[in-house]
Amino acid sequence: MTNSSNTFRRTGALCGKWRQAALASVAVLALSTSALAEAKPGDLLLSEEYLGTPPDLPITLSGSYLSGWIAGFNNDFGAAAAFFQEALNADNTNDGLLERTFRLKLANGEMIEATHYAQVLEDRDKGNFLSTLVLGSDAILKGDYQQGATIFGEPVSGPLAQLSTGIANAWALYGAGQLDGAFEQIDRLSGPEWFIAFKEYHMGMIAFAAGQKERALDHIENAFQADSGAIRIVNAYARTLAANGDKDKALDVLDEYNALMNGHPLLLDTRATVAGNAPIPPMIVDPAVGIAEILFGIGSAIGRDGGEELSMSYLRLALHLDPKAEFAAVALGGIYERLSQPAQAIAVLEKIPTGSVLKRNAEIQVGLNYNALEQLDQARDHLSALIEDDPKDVEAILTLGNILRSHEKFGEAEAIYTKAIDSLDEITSENWLAFYFRGICRERLKKWDAAEIDLRKALELNPDQPLVLNYLGYSLVDQGLKLDEALGMIEKAVELRPNDGYIVDSLGWVYYRLGRYEEAVKELERAVELRPADPVINDHLGDAYWKVGRRLEARFQWNHARDLEPTEEELPKILDKIANGMSEETGKDAAKAEGGETDD
């Protein structure tokens, strides 16, 4: 049960008059094509997993509308779509409910229903650019490219609408055999400067698909100059260079980008193809895939800061046109992760085809999402299977280690990090994290000598790394070792990351452990400003206040720390300080902060 479903239950109880709104899955018959054709505008079209009102509760217009509004506010688009569909069924002449239902069905990937409602909107002359995209895409999938071009050619307003329908129209014209018309359509598009990369990229893709490799290179080169940081454009540029016989430049482009990105699976795959002198086919030949490409490009660019619903609509339609659109699936999974909906992210990421260059990356994300669902066993099993399949996949090994470490299974995590380090053919600066994480585990396991070796190795591989400086310095001070060096390390870490509340807390706590209480108060007050909801930092500030005689403020901070859900180990200590204050011995034996490690 999601958090939003609990919200619906509380809201329903408050409304009382109509029902207690809830989320539930109900087994229903899938909607058939014939049923769709016969459906009336307000008919309740049921998908395989229906998330609206449970069958034992009455459906009312007000109840469904309010529940749908709350679900949408909480970004639970599946539930929102179901509830608005119920509301539309109760008032099937309401154009506002019709459009909202359509948009939510599209964002949730319910394409049969979305296509139906898009047609109803058009029949009522209430269509919009999204309904145009859906209906045009439906024609393309049926192979009717001319009809698709006609639909995409309908006038729309706004830059996003004009760019998406305009380039979709060009691909439809290409599919209809009207190559010149396709180029003219894109060339006519006028908009902001960021249009250029999209326009040039798609003209290049169409030219390449038509066998015009030299023209394709001209356009892709223009796209690269407009946006040399986009992986898809970099990949296209390298491929068109190689297809035109310039293998050396293609490899230079790939190597330059990979040096910045530490290697990307798509570009590494392209590099192997180019270096192996394999033929370079067009990236896109199917108009449906071309339209999916522009939808992915726009959808992935607008998926933040409240644009999730529109972004998901683009990405869902891209996957409808091209089920193998791996980048669209990764982008959609990323949105679900940002919305804290890991189950939905898993469902999307698992659809990425086995042969995709992004498959292993996606599977690693699946493991992380199992962990987000608090399903540690599934996460461990999933990642362990990946590692068994490729024992040298350091990213998968480190991910499993990080999950185990987050659950304080330090012994298991240490063994996993050791496996990662042992799998390395050569230790480079990129491998500092493996030593850093293993050092943390060994320190927590009270294997200090081995931990110090690892942490110093991490610092050797990545000098002045603030995370390592902080953890190593803090650990040394905690044990009363090499105090001058340790304090210098933490002061350097704060200098490098002055707004990291955890690192600032470390500096304050080190001052506290050294008996420099006034300096400790100053730094810990700043740490609390940076991380006001952290129980450890608030507890530390309470201790420092007590030491400088600010007893009332100390108890206030301890009470605040208590209310912020500290660990089971720390809670009794905090409660004792609230009741009895601190003795001198308490100050000397203060426990080591859990905040010594930043949350990066």
Image (tube, grey):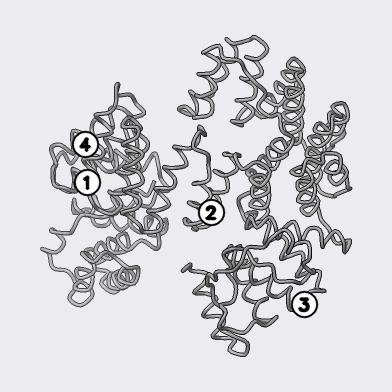
Of circles 1 and 4, which is in front? Answer: 1
Q: Amino acid at mark 2?
A: Tyr
Residue for badge 4: 485
Residue for badge 2: 336
Query: Sequence-wise, which precedes: disc 4 or disc 3?
Result: 3
Q: Residue at x 68, y 76 (%)?
A: 65
Query: Sequence-wise, which precedes: disc 2 or disc 1?
Result: 2
Q: Position of residue 166 (x, y in %)?
A: 82, 40
Q: CA distance from mark 3 to mark 1?
A: 58 Å
Crowding at label 4, few (<14), some or many (≥20) Cα neighbours within 10 Å?
Answer: few
Q: Residue at x 66, y 29 (%)?
A: 227
Q: Residue at x 28, y 73 (%)?
A: 555
> Residue most toward the bottom?
17
State the residue in front, 560 or 261: 261
Residue for badge 1: 412
Q: Position of residue 431 (x, y in %)?
A: 33, 30
Q: Which mark is residue 91?
A: 3
Q: Amino acid at mark 1?
A: Glu
Q: Residue at x 70, y 71 (%)?
A: 44
Q: Amino acid at mark 4?
A: Glu
Question: Regarding mark 2 in the picture, which secondary structure is present there?
Answer: helix
Q: CA distance from mark 1 to mark 4?
A: 31 Å
